[in-house]
């Protein structure tokens, strides 16, 4: 189990932009026993949405999280954007990791301000441009961006220890307690409530949906951006142990090959090609893989040729790989003749390796393309515009947090060594049949492929009467959908309708 957990950890951290603060070992947090005062800085701003100006308060602050004995164990940092009265919806927003702050969503997606970066290309060094965000969700909901404990400005304090927070269930409990304190302190118990998580943040959001329901807090909606809900269907076992990952990653490979013009006679739009890949993946391809070594040479040759047509790879290469193409091999091989590799977080981005040989890219060109812009912009923004005063160093990504992560999960009284939070989501949607769920997916995302998300949500056993509560959006972008402005514009429009449906007047 330890080896499996390590593979999980490496896989998830690879989905994070690789910019970590020089944080001390996580255990040192528990030795810093002093309990700080709760901090709060409130500033007044305005933003234009759809041609209309709206004023809002930005509150950058900390809340203490307490255990059952009313002892403070952690201080969680948040930035809340509020406009109007407490009857408005409120959305709690977070990234994932585990070990990521909320800075990525904060600076890139739905806050009133957004860092400006070029599309699918490296961002030049500072000075960076932070501009009003025309696609902010503030017109639909108040927004509360929350940093996980051990990341950002959130810290373990008092008698708290890493083991109290660094695990699937521990993390869900910490965020749940934060939400309880926030809505109590800010008179938001009767506000419509939403969760919005990205990557491992969707793991947290799905788990939280059931946790909060069990505490008497019924959600109006959950937004899952680039989901990771069930690792059992991903690449975390021996290469030939499970067939599903090869099938579920294939449509992402097809979309990427289409984008980079490696497909002969491609359809005009990526959605059409992706649909063809979906049907092939769970049809002929799944049948072929299920036969294993009993597949005849003629059958193998035929499937390899069709895989080549979808992936842009050569038939010979696919045969050498025994019809099983892993994501890292694809990212290294697709543009090998051009001495380029494609990104993992977003396959539209291209990188240059030391050489064109080898099995995998040396790094992810997507994360290195925009990471410094986010780090610098947030650090400047929180201190100058939001006027949050602290001597702490902001941790964009903390690898200490995930190092000893407890991947076990207890749901409905049963504990498993590895989580499957799709079941939590099913429970929440069943117990609260008004709960709406929106799944947002990027076509070019190799960290959390969209077809794997569809497969997981289609297999959670949701009652037929509740299927209408589950919505999907697909976008021509990667893991961080908002990095492509036209995709962000479409996502905002989709979510605007989703919020209207989830908060009927």
Image (cartoon, rainbow, N blue to C red):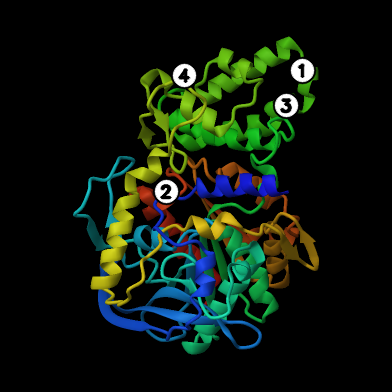
What label does residue 295 carry, if any?
1
In the depicted structure, whether residue 66 falls above or below residue 112: below
Residue 455, picture quadrant:
top right
Measured in 3D between alpha carbons, the distance from the residue under mark 3 to the one under mark 2, in whole angstroms, is 35 Å
Residue 201: % across, % down: 54, 60
Q: Earlier in the sequence, mark 1 or mark 2?
A: 2
Measured in 3D between alpha carbons, the distance from the residue under mark 1 to the one under mark 2, in whole angstroms, is 41 Å
Q: Which residue is mark 2?
A: 18
Observer-nearest of 416 and 208:
416
In the depicted structure, whether residue 320 falls above or below residue 261: above
Measured in 3D between alpha carbons, the distance from the residue under mark 4 to the one under mark 2, in whole angstroms, is 35 Å
Residue 382 makes an appearance in the image: yes
Q: Bin the neighbour count of mark 2 within 10 Å (Cα to Cα): few under 14, some 14-19, many 20 and up.
A: some
Instruction: Say which element carries label 2.
Output: loop
Residue 400: % across, % down: 51, 58
Q: Which residue is mark 3?
A: 289
Q: Earlier in the sequence, mark 3 or mark 1?
A: 3
In the shown orientation, is residue 208 left or right of residue 347?
right
Q: Which residue is mark 4?
A: 264
Residue for point 73% across, 58% down: 462
Measured in 3D between alpha carbons, the distance from the residue under mark 3 to the one under mark 4, in whole angstroms, is 25 Å
Instruction: Say which element carries label 1.
Output: loop
Residue for point 56% across, 65% down: 222
Disc 3 and disc 1 in contact, CB within 8 angstroms: no
Residue 5: % across, % down: 66, 49
Measured in 3D between alpha carbons, the distance from the residue under mark 4 to the one under mark 1, in whole angstroms, is 27 Å
Instruction: Say which element carries label 3.
Output: helix
């Amino acid at each position: 189990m330890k080896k499996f957990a390590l593979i999980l950890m490496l896989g998830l951290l690879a989905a994070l932009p690789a910019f970590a603060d020089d944080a001390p070992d996580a255990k040192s947090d528990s030795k810093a026993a002093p309990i700080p005062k709760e901090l709060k800085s409130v500033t007044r701003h305005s933003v234009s949405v759809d041609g209309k100006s709206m004023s809002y308060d930005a509150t950058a602050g900390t809340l203490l999280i307490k255990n059952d004995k009313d002892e403070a164990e952690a201080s969680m940092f948040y930035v809340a954007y509020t406009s109007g009265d407490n009857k408005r919806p409120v959305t709690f927003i977070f990234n994932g990791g585990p070990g990521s702050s909320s800075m990525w969503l904060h600076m890139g997606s739905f806050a009133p301000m957004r860092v400006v970066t070029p599309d699918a290309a490296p961002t030049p060094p500072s000075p960076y441009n932070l501009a009003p965000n025309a696609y902010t969700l503030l017109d639909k909901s108040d927004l509360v961006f929350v940093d996980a404990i051990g990341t950002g400005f959130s810290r373990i304090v008092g008698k708290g220890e890493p083991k109290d927070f660094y695990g699937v269930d521990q993390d869900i409990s910490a965020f749940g307690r934060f939400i309880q304190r926030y809505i109590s302190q800010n008179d938001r118990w009767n506000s419509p409530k939403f969760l919005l998580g990205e990557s491992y943040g969707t793991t947290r959001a799905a788990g939280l949906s059931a946790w909060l329901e069990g505490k008497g807090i019924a959600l109006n909606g959950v937004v899952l951006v680039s989901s990771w809900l069930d690792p059992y269907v991903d690449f975390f076992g021996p290469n030939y142990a499970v067939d599903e990952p090869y099938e579920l990653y294939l449509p992402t490979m097809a979309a990427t090959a289409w984008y980079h013009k490696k497909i002969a006679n491609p359809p005009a739009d990526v959605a059409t090609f992706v649909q063809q890949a979906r049907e092939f993946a769970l049809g002929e391809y799944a049948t072929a893989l299920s036969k294993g070594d009993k597949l005849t040479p003629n059958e193998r040759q035929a499937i390899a040729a069709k895989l080549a047509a979808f992936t842009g790879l050569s038939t010979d290469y696919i045969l050498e790989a025994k019809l099983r193409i892993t994501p890292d091999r694809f990212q290294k091989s697709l543009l090998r003749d051009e001495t380029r590799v494609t990104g993992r977080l977003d396959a539209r981005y291209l990188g240059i390796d030391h050489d064109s040989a080898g099995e995998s890219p040396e790094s992810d060109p997507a994360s290195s393309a925009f990471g410094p812009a986010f780090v610098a912009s947030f650090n400047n923004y929180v201190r100058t515009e939001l006027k949050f005063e602290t001597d702490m160093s902001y941790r964009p990504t903390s690898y200490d947090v995930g190092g000893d992560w407890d991947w076990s999960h207890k749901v409905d009284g049963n504990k498993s060594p590895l989580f499957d939070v799709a079941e939590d989501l099913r429970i929440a949607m069943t117990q609260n049949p008004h709960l709406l769920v929106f799944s947002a997916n990027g076509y070019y995302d190799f960290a959390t492929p969209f077809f794997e998300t569809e497969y997981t949500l289609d297999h959670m056993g949701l009652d037929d009467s509740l299927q209408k509560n589950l919505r999907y959006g697909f976008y021509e972008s990667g893991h961080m959908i908002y990095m492509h402005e036209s995709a962000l514009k479409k996502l905002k429009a989709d979510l605007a309708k989703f919020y209207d449906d989830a908060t009927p007047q």
